[in-house]
């Protein structure tokens, strides 16, 4: 009788776990993430959604919902890799683009979650997510549309009631893809103020003459008070955000 090799045993261990006992799709996503991070595997939200559709066609979700849920976990610090020695590596969100190997059009922006940049860049993430086995109700269609609208919202910086300017996660993701710079949850960004104080530029990498602020664990947003105390932000003001080379540019002219 042929004895299975150690390599084949390890390959079996790396297969996705059974999801038969999970009550809701969010629990199933967490089970898959725990498995991948335990076995030193990278993943994208599309891969998670595909596995859910294959194993649990009874789960009613939109692929975009899985993506936004994973981003929330990432920014809250809930995704991390642990090796056999107990060393912990927080997840890295690596910007990638599809090449047309699946139904997803080439050039579509995707995030791969990985412990290191090399692993994140090497990971083959393109999969065909099976179509849902259900017809969404009117309520579900509204829910799915709301999540999609949030994920693709216009990039607007708004001043909250406490006088802090809020940069949405969508904008941070846009500059990450534009520059190819990966981020970790709670990462620092660098903020530059123009000489006249009417333009802000936000960078993902160190830059001289900038102040630093950290992305928030709550949805990965960025919030900060005016760098110039003599020119505070006014609650209710809204400003357009543009990707400009290596920076997000915000001209402080209310919309």
Image: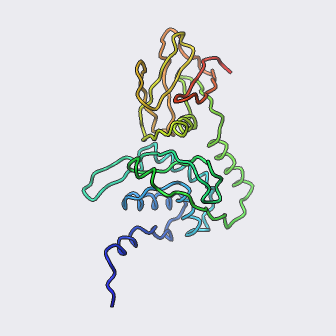
Q: Residue at x 67, y 67 (%)?
A: 133
Q: Is residue 75 above or below residue 3?
A: above
- Identify the colour scheme used: rainbow
Which residue, as the protein is rendered here, is positioned at the far bottom?
1
Compare residues 78 and 194 and report the one nearer the observer. Answer: 194
Compare residues 70 and 182 and report the one nearer the observer. Answer: 182
Name which quarter of the figure residue 36 lies in. Answer: bottom left
Percent across and percent down for residue 114 are: 42, 51
Q: Residue at x 54, y 65 (%)?
A: 51
Q: Residue at x 54, y 50 (%)?
A: 69
Percent across and percent down for residue 49 are: 56, 59
Percent across and percent down for residue 141 are: 72, 53
Q: Is residue 126 above or below residue 94?
A: below
Which residue, as the protein is rendered here, is positioned at the far left?
85
Name which quarter of the figure residue 217 lies in. Answer: top left
The mark tally for this picture is: 0
């Amino acid at each position: 009788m042929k004895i299975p090799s150690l390599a084949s045993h390890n390959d079996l261990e790396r297969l996705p776990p059974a999801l038969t006992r999970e009550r809701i799709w969010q629990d199933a996503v967490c089970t898959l993430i725990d498995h991948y991070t335990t076995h030193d595997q990278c993943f994208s939200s599309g891969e998670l959604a595909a596995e859910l559709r294959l194993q649990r066609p009874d789960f009613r979700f939109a692929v975009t919902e899985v993506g936004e849920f994973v981003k929330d976990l990432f920014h809250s610090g809930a995704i991390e890799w642990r090796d056999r020695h107990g060393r912990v590596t927080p997840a890295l969100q690596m910007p990638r683009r599809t090449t047309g190997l699946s139904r997803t059009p080439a050039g579509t922006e995707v995030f791969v979650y990985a412990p290191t940049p090399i692993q994140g860049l090497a990971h083959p993430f393109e999969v065909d997510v099976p179509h849902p086995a259900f017809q969404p109700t009117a309520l579900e269609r509204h829910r799915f549309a709301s999540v999609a609208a949030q994920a693709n919202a216009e990039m607007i910086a708004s001043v909250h009631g406490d006088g802090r300017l809020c940069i949405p996660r969508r904008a941070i993701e846009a500059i990450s893809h534009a520059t190819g710079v990966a981020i970790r949850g709670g990462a620092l960004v660098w903020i530059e103020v123009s000489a006249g104080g009417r333009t802000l530029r936000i960078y993902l990498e160190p830059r001289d003459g900038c102040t630093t602020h950290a992305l928030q664990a709550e949805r990965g947003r960025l919030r900060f008070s005016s760098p110039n105390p003599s020119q505070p932000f006014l609650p209710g003001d809204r400003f357009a955000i543009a990707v400009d080379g290596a920076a997000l540019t915000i001209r402080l002219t209310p919309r």
